[in-house]
Image: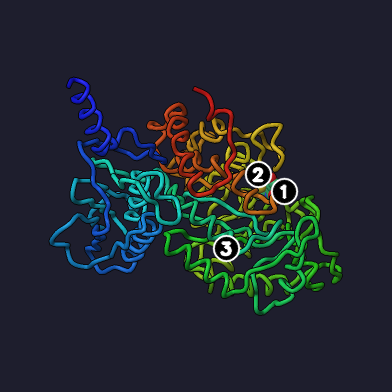
Amino acid sequence: KASGVVLLIIMSFACSKPAPKLSDVALIPLPDMVAEEAGAFELDESTKIFVEQDDKGLQNVAEFLSSLINKSTGFNIQVVKDEPAEGNFIALKIGAGSGEEAYKLNVGLEKIEISGATAAGVFWGVQTLRQLMPDQIEKSGEYEGVDWLIPAGSIQDDPEYAYRGSMLDVARHFFSVEDVKRYIDLLVMYKINYLHLHLADDQGWRIEIKSWPKLTEIGGSTEVGGGEGGFYTQDEYKELVSYAQKRFITIVPEIDMPGHTNAALASYPELNCNDESPELYTGIEVGFSTLCTDKEVTYQFIDDVIRELVELTPGPYIHIGGDESHVTAMEDYIPFIEQAQDIVNSYGKKVIGWDEIAHAALRPSSTAQYWAKAENAKLAVDQGAKVLISPASKAYLDMQYDSTTELGLHWAAYIELDSAYMWDPAKLVEGIGKENILGVEAPLWTETITKMEDIEYMVFPRLIGIAEVAWTSPEKRDWESYKGRLKKHTNRLEALGVGYYQSPLLKEE
Ligand code: TNX
């Protein structure tokens, strides 16, 4: 008899769904405030997504959420415009909030509400909600036998920095529209909101410019190692921009100048001071090329390129490069950068450039991207410009993890997961504080990176830590806490088929 009772007890435990707890969930980036409550919300076939206002951005968020849920659960969850009279639902709304991207997420037993200051805030709230769902939400295809429970509680959140970015170098090696879309899909999970595309360098020109067609015809025809290269037609590029935009990511296009321009110089002899085109270049040296800064045609060229690029760019920034122009004399470099800045501004956009541009007179609307020289970053701030923080020794995703890493370079550092996480953007440079900082960006240079699997290996999980550096306030960040959360989170990377670096640090107790 007694054993029967024990069996009953065991059975009732086994059958009742163990309610997950909010405090057990690994949230990355860590939100501002998390408060746990008892019980859970259960997603089922009849759950609805209720969009409270008629707003295009909110509608995009609702579609993103419904397709995420439907893809993995096999449900056919609907987006509705009227509050459901019965059954549980997820309500999305634009409400009051402090920062532009702030949101509140409340999970009750029958209703989940995400309220953001803007649709972008609601979208980041959805990314948090996603992490509250079982790991299987990241799988494609119907998933049988999962209880889709979401632990009850409430979360308030607001990012530390407005610009949280990653850069992808599609010039050294070209990556397809599909690859870039997958990259975008992975970025949004960590609330990254800018994707900087390095579209032109010595080894390749990757964006169609209708008024200068040889840039892609010739300049786009190869890449590092002599492969076939490639480029985006303007239509393909527009498709990328709109794919990103629906996911609240702004694309920042970069045309590097006056150095890093061999592909352009090889396409048009008139851009060279001696009117002769060099050969295409497929090596990985830097600093040997320059546009001819005292020819008028050079500025006509830049004007045409920027004008066409601006037409493809809804976002506020155009990146003009400006790095490592070692064969441009400083007295030529400075007026060149100032003129490029004027051209960008004349089309209503703001300039970002690598930290060397701070040698020129910068407008307050311009931003210097600090990658190497603290004194350049300081020069920018002294002129009233902002700084984007991308220190090579912390945030360069092409740096090797350690001396055994096969891909990547190590001129700046080896960057293990702890090193990529344990730093504060506002404490890097004496005299540069949060108020001077636009945000944080982690670039992936691709001299040694040839395919999507390589991207995934170098970027993940390092970028996840940098995303937390950019989103979560420094007082709340802690390596041990982050490491514990990341260990749990790797299940999701696996569910997504991301071939990430299995750091020994994640195997430690
Ligand atoms: C420096 S970072 C460069 C790039 C290289 C990178 C490799 C910067 C502004 N310039 O041209 O790809 O190092 O790590």
* Residue in view at x 63 percent, y 72 percent: 305
> Callout 2: helix, strand or loop?
loop
Q: Which residue is outermost to the top? A: 2
Image height of 413 relative to 382, above or below: above
* Residue in view at x 41 percent, y 47 percent: 136
**503 left or right of 162?**
right
> Callout 1: helix, strand or loop?
loop
Mark toward the start of the polypeptide (2 vs 3): 3
* Residue in view at x 57 percent, y 49 percent: 369
Closer to viewer: mark 1 or mark 3: 3
Using the numbered discs, state the Cα–Cα distance from disc 1 to disc 3 in whole angstroms.
Answer: 20 Å
Badge 3 density bin: few <14, some 14–19, many ≥20, Cα 10 Å: few
**158 left or right of 324?**
left
Instruction: Tell which of 208 and 428 is nearer to you.
Output: 208
Dot 1 corresponds to which residue? 448
Residue 94 appears in the figure: no
Contact check, label 2 and label 3, Cβ < 8 Å: no
Whole-percent x, y for residue 57 in the image: 34, 65
> Callout 3: helix, strand or loop?
helix
Whole-percent x, y for residue 149 in the image: 29, 45
Q: Is mark 3 within 8 Å of ligand 1?
A: no
Residue 415 appears in the figure: yes
Which disc number belongs to residue 398? 2
Which disc number belongs to residue 178? 3
Image height of 315 relative to 326, above or below: below
Q: Amino acid at mark 2?
A: Asp
* Residue in view at x 57 percent, y 63 percent: 178
Using the numbered discs, state the Cα–Cα distance from disc 1 to disc 2 in whole angstroms.
Answer: 8 Å
Q: Amino acid at mark 1?
A: Thr
Q: Is mark 2 within 8 Å of ligand 1?
A: yes
Badge 2 density bin: few <14, some 14–19, many ≥20, Cα 10 Å: many
Q: Quadrant of residue 376?
A: top right
